[in-house]
Amino acid sequence: MWATIDENAQRVALVHELIQPGEAFRLTDDQRKAIDTISTQLDDGVLEFLLKAPTGSGKTEVMLRVAVDTILKTEGYIVIIAPTRDLIRQHITYFTDRLAGTGIGVGQIHGGASPAERRAVEAGIEDGTIHVVVGSAMMLTIDRHWRIIDESDLLVIDDVNAFDEREHLRLLEDLDCPMLFATATPAELKRFLERIGAMDNVVAMKKMPFDVLPTKVHKVEGVWGEPPAEQLSRADALIREHLARGSRIFVIGRTRGDVPRLAERLEHTYQIDVQQLRGDMADTHEQSKRYRRKGVKVNEVGTRVEMMNEFRSKAPAVLAATNLVGSGIDIPAADLIVITDSDAFGEAEIEQLIGRVGRRERPSDAVLLTGTTFEKNPSRAMASPRAKSFMPRGTRARQFDFGRRR
């Protein structure tokens, strides 16, 4: 089986532009060490791990090989939870392609999958034909899906920093299955990871699979209150340079409402089709129909699957999106990211977003458009000159004054 997996690795690496024609796919020393360490400690009964590794260092490959090793030893199944449906689909594609011909079945359980698809996966777990389940945090909130996780031989939480601790991660504390947490930025969840025991078994990777050039970060000061679409002019030279180079470009907006306005401005300025990715888009046309039947409003610009396929298949290409892309999305030849209203994002979010580019042996750039809005960190935001100079007026001023007098 491992021979088939290694053959698939070479083929998939070429298709996904992870290697150049004529090159051989090889694990890094850090990947080999991480796989051996986690697999050995699982055999010894260790139940919680943290895989800490920078974006682009090959965490998914480690997860795949640990998963296969676990499945072969237990003859059971493992579950992977990812924070976005786009990352779930990316994992489904990767695992399905890598495990082709091995007899290891892959299935998905999340809101974008139809009820029939979810029932088929549940049946596959029962009859032993499904061994890898990739799902969303929804699985933690539905009793029968929670039991699927609890009875698994390994739960992998990918990009754990993207989950809400109070809403989702607290539900993990009652599970009895082994758990592997993977992230590039664990600092924000340090207390949770310590409480659950993962900080006692940290497996770190540093080496990248390629001789990656550092991404050049450009902080460009804007005008307070400047609309995101207007901010793009400050990144014009780099956008034109990367379009001429045949790059794929991310342009990030703070809100769903910013995305269509960014796309419209980009299309008008650069005469190129711009894809969109935002939370109110259905995954597929079938899901869109289900939503409409339930009275759920869906953005009709296109489906997430169509948009991402279009973006992946073209070069140059531009994707206007929210920070959904920060959760593990791997796009070959993505060499520029422009983040509007960048002060509104946290440090971990910025690190994850910048990690979407510069994953190959080519120059890459990240443009942080700053000075247009309050910082996300409340203490830093309220210490800013803009906050200190804020004076409420009219009715708000009277309420403010009345509140102080009381």
Image (cartoon, grey):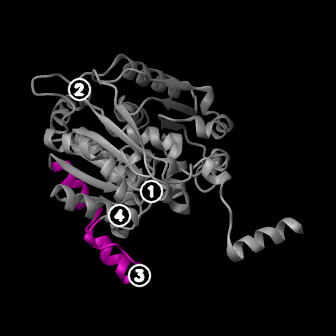
**What amino acid does circle 3 point to?**
Lys
Please tell me whether mark 4 sits on a helix, a strand or a loop.
loop
Residue annotated with mark 4: 113
Q: Is residue 389 left or right of residue 335?
A: right
Residue annotated with mark 3: 294
Residue shown at the point (20%, 33%) measured from the top left: 13
- Measure how far apart labels 3 and 4 are at the Cα level: 15 Å
**What amino acid does circle 4 point to?**
Ala
Q: Quadrant of residue 158?
A: top left
Give coordinates of residue 217: x percent, y percent: 38, 34
- Ranked by sequence position, the earlier of labels 2 and 4 is 4
Range of residues picked out in magenta: 284-313
- Ranked by sequence position, the earlier of labels 3 and 4 is 4
Please tell me whether mark 1 sits on a helix, a strand or a loop.
loop
- Ranked by sequence position, the earlier of labels 2 and 3 is 3
Q: Nearer the viewer, residue 24 or 36?
A: 24
Q: Residues within 10 Å of mark 1 (few under 14, many from 20)?
A: some
- Measure how far apart labels 4 and 1 are at the Cα level: 27 Å
